[in-house]
């Protein structure tokens, strides 16, 4: 019996990691336009915090944690690299839902308004696509990782 693992969960893991990278890159691209200045999601979150736009709300807590997104994305990718597929898939789903919700909201809002201050769709759209890819990969991993583990342990006690 062969003790090889099925490759399908690792293909989905690769898709999830690629999506995580794209989503994190999108957070560094422009999200807000004020005059001729383009600001990343981190600069935008800093401005919202500085002006106290979300004080006393759940949004203020999320805003404070926004700077941790690259670390969370890297942690998810690291879990995939360590072959902790199901754990990585769960954290990737959480990451995708958090970033994706904000990115989709900004993408939808980005088309409205031609004033001095507005949403630039480059960053939010990139993060939206990345989170969709990461979410699809994580769901694929969750659906197929069980079979990969079963395949690896099925012949573990059998010597040729």
Image (spheres, helix red, strand yellow):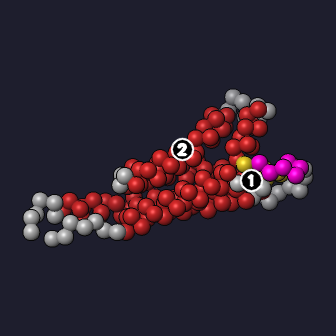
> Residue 22 sits in which quadrant?
bottom right
Taking 120 as reference, is 148 left or right?
A: left
Residue that badge 2 annotates:
71
The reply to whether residue 94 is visible in this rendering is: no
Closer to the N terminus: mark 2 or mark 1?
Answer: 1
Q: Which residues are magenta?
A: 34-39
> Residue 52 sits in which quadrant?
top right
Q: Is residue 33 magenta?
A: no
Most distant residue in the top direction: 56
Compare residues 35 and 59 and report the one nearer the observer: 35
Q: Position of residue 28 (x, y in %)?
A: 67, 51
Q: Position of residue 18 (x, y in %)?
A: 52, 61
| Looking at the image, residue 159 lies above or below residue 24 | below
The residue that appears at 54% across and 44% down in the rendered structure is 71
Taking 136 as reference, is 52 left or right?
A: right
Magenta span: predominant SS is: strand
Residue that badge 1 annotates:
30
Q: Give the spatial CA distance, label 2 vs label 1.
A: 20 Å
The residue that appears at 74% across and 52% down in the rendered structure is 31
| Looking at the image, residue 45 lies above or below residue 50 | below
Q: Secondary structure at mark 1?
A: strand
The residue that appears at 39% across and 64% down in the rendered structure is 10
């Amino acid at each position: 019996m062969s003790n090889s693992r099925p490759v399908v969960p690792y293909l989905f893991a690769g898709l999830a990691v690629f999506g995580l990278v794209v989503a994190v890159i999108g957070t560094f691209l422009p999200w807000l336009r004020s005059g001729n200045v383009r600001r990343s999601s981190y600069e935008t979150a800093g401005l919202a915090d500085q002006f106290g736009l979300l004080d006393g709300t759940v949004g203020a807590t999320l805003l404070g944690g926004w700077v941790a997104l690259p670390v969370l994305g890297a942690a998810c990718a690291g879990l995939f690299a360590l072959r902790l597929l199901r754990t990585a898939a769960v954290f990737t789903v959480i990451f995708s839902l958090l970033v994706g919700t904000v990115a989709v909201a900004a993408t939808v809002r980005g088309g409205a308004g031609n004033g001095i201050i507005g949403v630039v769709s480059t960053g939010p759209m990139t993060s939206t696509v990345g989170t969709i890819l990461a979410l699809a990969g994580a769901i694929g991993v969750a659906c197929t990782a069980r079979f990969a583990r079963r395949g690896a342990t099925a012949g573990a006690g059998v010597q040729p």
